[in-house]
Amino acid sequence: MNIGHFPPPKQRGLIIHGLILLVLVIIAIIGFVNLSSAEVGPVFLISLLVSLVAFLPIPFFLYRTYALWRADYYMDRDSLAIHWGLRVEDIPLTDIEWIRPADDLAHPLSLPSFRWPGGLLGVRRHPDLGLVEFLAADPKKLLLIATAKRVFVISPDNPAALVQTFARATELGSITHTEAKSVYPSFVVTQAWESGLARYLWLSALFLNLGLFIWASLIIPSTPQVALSPQFVGGAPESVPSSQLILFPVASLLLSITGWIAGLYFYRWERERVLAFIVWGSSTLPSLLFLLAVLFIITTPI
């Protein structure tokens, strides 16, 4: 029975995450567009480097945005549940030793090194409390949840209401016995890696993308022009700089990463794991198609 729902403040963090993603996507697109028209040389290398530097953090920020969007704190008469993306912590109320604001500490609480609005995540060590794990969004609304294992730092939008609800739930007493539960994003990856089929699909996608990158990198310096307008569209093949071939491995990698993350999302639930394998298997198909496309292009006479 839910008696308390205390989401963290999200609006400012989501806006900042969204702006960061927008800037990265724009830079990556501009870089890839320049790649499609640049000859092999300094401009090509700079465009490739800028595109990759802008593209690689995008999955990370996408996950952080999703995690903040889904972040929530729930309390009933049995437990306090902390949800932050793929990170889940269910704490029986009987395991909670105390709850207090971070401002009450004699020694100030050190925030995670890598932080920004909407993203106070990580583990720090406090001289009095030991290990402290942050699952918070706003440094001005921090609450400490002390357990025997470690202290958790959260940031409900209304900290006082959560403290009052905890006191009321403690007075009412627990209805059923609840087991503590900890789920980490890395645990989902580790659990999936134990499956032979998942390992096979992941490694297949990895080697296909590596092969596509290596093949395109070997073709570009040795073949100045390629035919990038298939004859079945109608008309004669169009000769273009071979540097445009780099778009194939980049697009393949983007689709593979998207499929890998989507598969992990479904793998969290036992009933959805078949769907996770289907997604991972499907994400290898674009890589195969891109390989065939490159083969078709380089064998088409100009």
Image: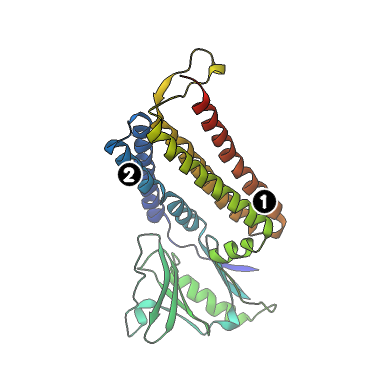
Badge 2 amino acid: Val
Q: Residue at x 53, y 13 (%)?
A: 234
Q: Which residue is mark 1?
A: 277
In the picture, measured across the screen, residue 191 lies left or right of residue 59, that is: right
Q: Residue at x 32, y 80 (%)?
A: 108
Q: Nearer the viewer, residue 166 or 60?
A: 60
Name the N-terminal-most of marks 1 and 2: 2
Total marks in image:
2
Give the crowd class for mark 1: few <14, some 14-19, many >=20 residues within 10 Å. many
- Vertical relation: 161 (above or below) 99: above
- Check whether the beta carbons of the residues at disc 1 and disc 2 lie within 8 A of each other: no
Quote the CA–CA distance across marks 1 and 2. Answer: 33 Å
* Name of the residue lying farthest toward the front: 222
Report the quarter where the N terminus lies: bottom right
Q: Find residue 266 and report its image quarter.
A: bottom right
SS class, disc 2: helix
Give the crowd class for mark 2: few <14, some 14-19, many >=20 residues within 10 Å. some
* Name of the residue lying farthest toward the left: 42
Q: Nearer the viewer, residue 58 or 31?
A: 31
Q: Residue at x 34, y 41 (%)?
A: 27
Report the quarter where the C terminus lies: top left
State whether residue 19 appears in this view. Answer: no
In the picture, measured across the screen, residue 153 lies left or right of residue 175, that is: left
- Vertical relation: 103 (above or below) 66: below
- Vertical relation: 109 (above or below) 249: below
**Image location of residue 8, percent across then percent down:** 45, 62
Which disc is residue 233 wearing? none
Badge 1 amino acid: Phe
**Image location of residue 270, percent across then percent down:** 70, 60
Which disc is residue 50 wearing? 2
In the picture, measured across the screen, residue 117 lies left or right of residue 160, that is: left
State whether residue 156 appears in this view. Answer: yes
